Image (tube, coloured by chain):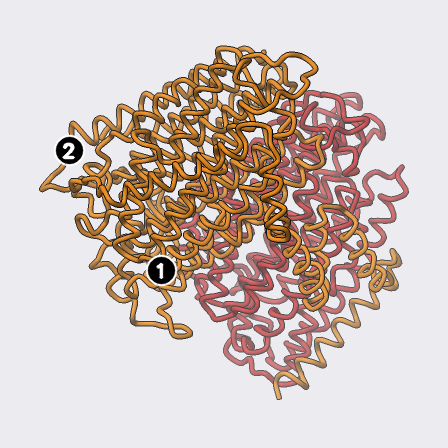
Chain colours: A orange, B red
């Protein structure tokens, strides 16, 4: 492995970010776009070169793909515990390099058209580069601490990009919400890291994942509340992953995050950052699998399955097309988590792991395509809502075809990419648990249904009276659509199980015809239902939703989850938890200065006399302090 | 005693010579050339700082009154860099003042005299030397606080400071005399062997402790801080919060871990309580401040609480992390005060509201400020994060889980108000933002050193390893 290449991959976007950030006032928008795209194209080439070298030149040694690590000790904390910085190359990190590079490059190209004329054009490209750099760093991390640092950086760049339209109140609120919810989850992650560091004396992935290493070999030696401490740490780490990957119940930030520019949604909230949680679990998979017989892994499976179902149901009722896609993302991420959760380790046992990574790969392609397609539509009609769309196929032929391809791919229609990966997930679920398999098939049907609901709603159905006739987007926007469409068709044919498996050895897969048939039928059923409901203008859908009555209302309000959180936050949390902390949080939730103003006014009014500006009072406080301390420590504490 | 052994006092002798040289130089400089004193002082002090890093032997002088070892030597070097950076940042403001008031050399004389006091305080081997150092480091600062004599606030700050300081040192001296009464010696080494926790020694210890707590501005000895920072010139506020506090924290650590070790069962809970009180008070007051100097005053009170967190442990890890944290704190605060200084000496504006939209007009200054605040707040990967992280780990390794938890709560609160400033600079448009200006070369250099210090401490791990090695001397 060429170390220089590997370091250049993240270094180039970082350099671009610094240049664009520092000289943002002096660079012309046209130049900054070109610099951004050129920088990323170089990184992409290097990523592909790395992948080619890793998989085909170096290949397997003794039938197993090797792991390459280059690192330096950054902080020697105690004699045994140290924090390293470095790069780690193994099948999943190489795969993620490809995903991040490809999608990011497409989004960069697309943004040149989409953001044209925007005031903060240069700022936008600077943030995109910052994000890409952080994501590369996350993917290549060699240890828990390094991944945590980049994890936070990714969070920061996501915060900046969601709040990109900072004059919009809703965008600022959404950015804060995303930041706070994921920060809350990361708190768990950090505690998990501390526990691991304390009990195993290492942060290093390879040592942790080593079956003979301190984590896996001695997990049973210390326990807390009936579970191994290491299991607790893994659950806490998964909490961080669940926050980033919008797993139930930490999903509430993702729909709101759609306030950001659409290319950002495609890059961060569909294809790359949100899969970081899945990647984290995959990165620690041997630990998840071997510690306490995979207790933590079971939690991953059920949280994933529930999120997949929960989000798919909500997606049916949303009217904002970006929110439909957001819930769809959450649902598909749930799929990946479930697949990891049911996976075994060796050979074909590890089909769940392979399927999860495979789905991560294909999903990135077609979900980015869906978002960019939606962006193209929003660009044309200047609205996010289904009611403002309809009949657009005549005006936007390229967007129409590419969106259809992506919709077919996510619905699992063969031979498109989604079919292959989804099929493997269902095989893995079937072999592990009939129950999870049932959920999987049901979600597959729902996915096809809601996706074609919006497809028909946007491109078919009755035409809205457009103020100006919509037109196809410029070439810089349709080019990425076409490339991604080709990838959405072709990505499924990659023999993924040869390259990316839990034991790194690879195995041959074959389609289980029965299971495949069931999945296809479920998908087609969803499409047909959507066709009956939404293709032509009729009131079937309306009557149907009326029949569901209250359930429909609940669903369209996302099961009132935001309201529940607000209720918990406002009523229960604030009234019973200590006042200063409570007030502090309140203002975060409210997103206003009000809470904090009130809070400190109360506190400072109470202690106002202490900061009066009079020296006599200060002297009194000083002497009083001495006297009290003396009394306490001479007469109370020591005796 | 050989002449050679006087070289142990190299820092002190050099600095004293500089003071004399500057005094003489002033006599010969023509009136209209007074501002060239700034260049002269900078050159002298720059040389002094550089020379300070040459290796120095360990040992003691005057029968143990004065001592030096590698850690002390290292910390004097850090203080030198701090003061040098501070001088660079103050140059522009000072020049303006010199032209206006036709004076200014005393700024250097007083500042260096105070620094000399700090040297003696850090190197003290007995309470007498310690007390002289304490006084020498405090009194000139009171005069410096009144430096802008035409400003009412400046005078007020000076009066408040001198009164509070006099009270503190009086109380401290009273405590020292009690310690002498019970132990029959003022030498640290003697006291260490005879010290037992009787009521009188405990009272003496607490009175003595109050004097140092005043310098570090621990609650409830912190009241002067905000008023003095706000009224005094920024350079002096910066000096008080960076150099003075850093040196006092360092000497407190030395005393607690050596002389006062027999009282550990008392000072552990004492520091525990004061750490919490200081963090919460500093943070809660900082939330609502509008004036940047006041804001940084409360922020620096809160940071002092974190320092105590490391002192509580009393282990080698504790020593290393405290020195590391204090060093990081010095550079971070220098950067923050430097930006405030740059803006104030250019425009006279000191309120948070004036910073709105700063990023659009002065992006580089905003970035420096952002880095400094990130470091103070402890956001990775800036140095401050490691400082706090190590402190917490040191405290947790001694089993102070509750304290660490409450400290984490405080970090969260502080994150909020540090982000307020960042929001004002980056996200707000501002009706009337500060126009673009170019800083003088000295200011640029001053900010550069502070930023480099912050980055180097975080990114270049041998520095921490070095401090860790040095810390072995105290445990």
User: Residue B334's spot in the image, x, y percent?
Assistant: 63, 40
Of residue A429 and residue B130, the one placed in the foreground of this image is A429
Q: Local crowd at mark 1 within 10 Å, few (<14), some, or many (≥20)?
A: some
As drawn, the label of residue B442 is: none
Q: Using the rendered view, name the quadrant where residue A56 is placed.
A: top left
Dot 1 corresponds to which residue? A298
Mark 1 or mark 2: whose residue is earlier in sequence:
2
User: Residue B311's spot in the image, x, y percent?
Assistant: 54, 64
User: Residue A47's spot in the image, x, y percent?
Assistant: 31, 26
Quadrant holding the C terminus of chain B: bottom left
Q: Residue furthest left?
A: A62
Viewed as shown, does residue B373 lie left or right of A487? right
Dot 2 corresponds to which residue? A59
Q: CA distance from mark 1 to mark 2?
A: 33 Å
Of residue A388 and residue B422, the one placed in the foreground of this image is A388
Q: Residue at x 53, y 24 (%)?
A: A126
């Amino acid at each position: 492995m060429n170390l220089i290449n590997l370091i250049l991959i993240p270094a180039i976007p970082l350099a671009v970010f610094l240049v664009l950030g520092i000289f943002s006032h002096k660079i012309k928008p046209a130049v900054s776009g070109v610099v951004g795209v050129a920088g990323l194209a170089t990184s992409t080439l290097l990523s592909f070169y790395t992948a080619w070298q890793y998989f085909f030149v170096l290949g397997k040694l003794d039938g197993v793909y090797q792991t390459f690590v280059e690192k330096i000790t950054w902080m020697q904390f105690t004699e045994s515990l140290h924090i390293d910085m470095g790069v780690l190359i193994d099948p999943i990190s190489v795969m993620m390099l490809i995903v991040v590079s490809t999608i990011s490059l497409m989004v960069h190209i697309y943004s040149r058209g989409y953001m044209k004329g925007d005031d903060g054009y240069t700022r936008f490209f600077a943030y995109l580069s910052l994000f890409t750099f952080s994501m590369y760093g996350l993917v290549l991390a060699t240890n828990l601490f390094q991944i945590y640092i980049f994890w936070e950086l990714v969070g920061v760049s996501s915060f900046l990009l969601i709040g990109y339209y900072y004059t919009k109140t809703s965008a600022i609120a959404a950015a804060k919400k995303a930041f706070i919810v994921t920060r809350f989850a990361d708190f768990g992650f950090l505690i998990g890291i501390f526990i691991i560091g304390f009990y195993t004396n290492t942060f290093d992935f390879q040592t942790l994942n080593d079956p003979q290493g301190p984590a896996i070999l001695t997990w049973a030696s210390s326990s807390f509340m009936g579970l191994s401490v290491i299991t607790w740490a893994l659950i806490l780490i998964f909490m961080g992953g669940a926050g980033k990957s919008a797993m139930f119940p930490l999903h509430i930030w993702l729909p709101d995050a759609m306030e950001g520019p659409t290319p950002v949604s495609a890059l961060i909230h569909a294809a790359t950052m949100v899969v970081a949680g899945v990647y984290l679990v995959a990165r620690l998979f041997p630990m998840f699998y071997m510690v306490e017989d995979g207790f933590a892994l079971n939690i991953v499976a059920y949280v994933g399955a529930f999120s997949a179902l929960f989000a798919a149901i909500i997606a049916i009722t949303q009217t904002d097309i970006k929110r439909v896609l957001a819930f769809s993302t959450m649902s598909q991420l749930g799929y990946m988590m479930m697949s990891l959760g049911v996976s075994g380790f060796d050979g074909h046992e590890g089909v769940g792991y392979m399927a999860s990574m495979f789905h991560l790969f294909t999903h990135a392609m077609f979900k980015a395509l869906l978002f960019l397609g939606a962006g193209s539509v929003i660009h044309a009609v200047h609205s996010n809502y289904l009611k403002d769309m309809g009949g657009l196929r005549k005006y936007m032929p390229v967007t129409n075809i590419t969106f259809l391809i992506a919709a077919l791919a996510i619905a699992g229609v063969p031979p498109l990419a989604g079919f292959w990966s989804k099929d493997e997930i269902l095989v893995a679920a079937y072999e592990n648990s009939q129950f999870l398999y049932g959920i999987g098939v049901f979600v597959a049907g729902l996915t096809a249904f809601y996706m074609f609901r919006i497809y028909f709603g946007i491109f078919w159905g009755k035409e809205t009276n457009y103020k100006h006739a919509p037109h196809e987007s410029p070439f810089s926007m349709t080019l990425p659509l076409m490339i991604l469409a080709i990838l959405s068709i072709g990505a499924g044919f990659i023999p993924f199980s040869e390259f990316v498996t839990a034991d790194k050895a690879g195995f041959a897969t074959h389609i289980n015809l029965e299971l495949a048939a069931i999945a296809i039928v479920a998908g087609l059923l969803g499409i047909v239902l959507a066709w009956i409901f939404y293709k032509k203008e009729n009131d079937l859908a309306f009557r149907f939703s009326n029949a569901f009555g209250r359930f429909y209302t609940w669903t369209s309000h996302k099961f009132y989850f935001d309201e529940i959180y607000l209720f918990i936050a406002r009523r229960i949390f604030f009234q019973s938890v200590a006042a200063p902390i409570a007030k502090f949080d309140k203002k975060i939730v409210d997103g206003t200065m009000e809470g904090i103003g009130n809070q400190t006014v109360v506190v400072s009014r109470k202690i106002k006399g202490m900061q009066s500006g009079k020296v006599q009072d200060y002297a009194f406080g000083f002497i009083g302090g001495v006297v009290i301390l003396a009394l306490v420590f001479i007469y109370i504490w020591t005796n | 005693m050989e002449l050679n052994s006087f070289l142990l006092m190299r820092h002190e002798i050099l600095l004293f010579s500089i003071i004399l040289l500057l005094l003489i130089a002033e006599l010969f400089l023509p009136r209209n050339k007074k501002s060239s004193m700034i260049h002269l002082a900078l050159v002298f002090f720059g040389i002094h700082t550089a020379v300070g890093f040459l290796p120095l032997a360990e040992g003691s002088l005057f029968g143990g009154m004065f001592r030096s070892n590698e850690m002390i030597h290292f910390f004097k070097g850090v203080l030198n860099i701090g003061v040098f950076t501070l001088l660079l940042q103050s140059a522009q403001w000072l020049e303006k003042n010199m032209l206006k008031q036709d004076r200014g050399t005393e700024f250097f004389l007083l500042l260096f005299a105070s620094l000399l006091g700090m040297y003696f305080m850090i190197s003290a081997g007995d309470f007498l030397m310690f007390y002289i150092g304490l006084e020498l480091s405090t009194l000139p600062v009171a005069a410096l606080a009144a430096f802008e004599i035409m400003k009412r606030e400046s005078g007020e700050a000076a009066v408040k400071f001198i009164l509070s300081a006099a009270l503190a040192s009086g109380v401290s001296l009273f405590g020292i005399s009690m310690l002498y009464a019970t132990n029959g010696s003022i030498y640290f080494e003697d006291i260490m062997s005879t010290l037992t926790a009787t009521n009188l020694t405990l009272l003496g210890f607490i009175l003595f402790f109050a004097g140092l707590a005043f310098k570090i501005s621990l609650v409830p000895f912190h009241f002067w801080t905000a008023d003095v920072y706000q009224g005094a010139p920024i350079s002096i506020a910066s000096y008080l919060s960076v150099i003075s506090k850093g040196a006092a924290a360092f000497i407190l650590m030395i005393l607690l871990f050596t002389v006062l070790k027999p009282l550990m069962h008392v000072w552990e809970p004492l520091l525990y309580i004061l750490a919490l009180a200081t963090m919460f008070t500093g943070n809660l007051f900082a939330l609502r401040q509008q004036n940047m100097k006041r804001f940084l005053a409360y922020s620096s009170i809160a940071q002092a609480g974190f320092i105590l967190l490391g002192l509580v442990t009393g282990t080698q890890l504790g020593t290393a992390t405290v020195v590391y944290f204090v060093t990081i704190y010095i550079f971070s605060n220098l950067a923050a005060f430097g930006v405030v200084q740059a803006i104030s000496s250019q425009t006279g504006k000191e309120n948070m509201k004036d910073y709105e939209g700063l990023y659009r007009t002065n992006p580089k200054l905003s970035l420096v400020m952002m880095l400094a605040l990130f470091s103070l707040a402890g956001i990775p990967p800036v140095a401050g994060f490691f400082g706090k992280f190590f402190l917490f780990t040191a405290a947790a390794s001694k089993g102070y889980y509750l304290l660490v938890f409450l400290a984490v709560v405080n970090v969260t609160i502080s994150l909020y108000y540090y982000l307020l400033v960042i929001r004002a600079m980056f996200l707000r448009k501002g009706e009337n933002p500060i126009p673009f200006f170019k800083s003088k070369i000295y200011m640029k250099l001053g900010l550069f050193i502070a930023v480099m210090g912050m980055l180097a401490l975080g990114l270049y791990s041998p520095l921490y390893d070095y401090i860790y090695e040095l810390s072995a001397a105290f445990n």
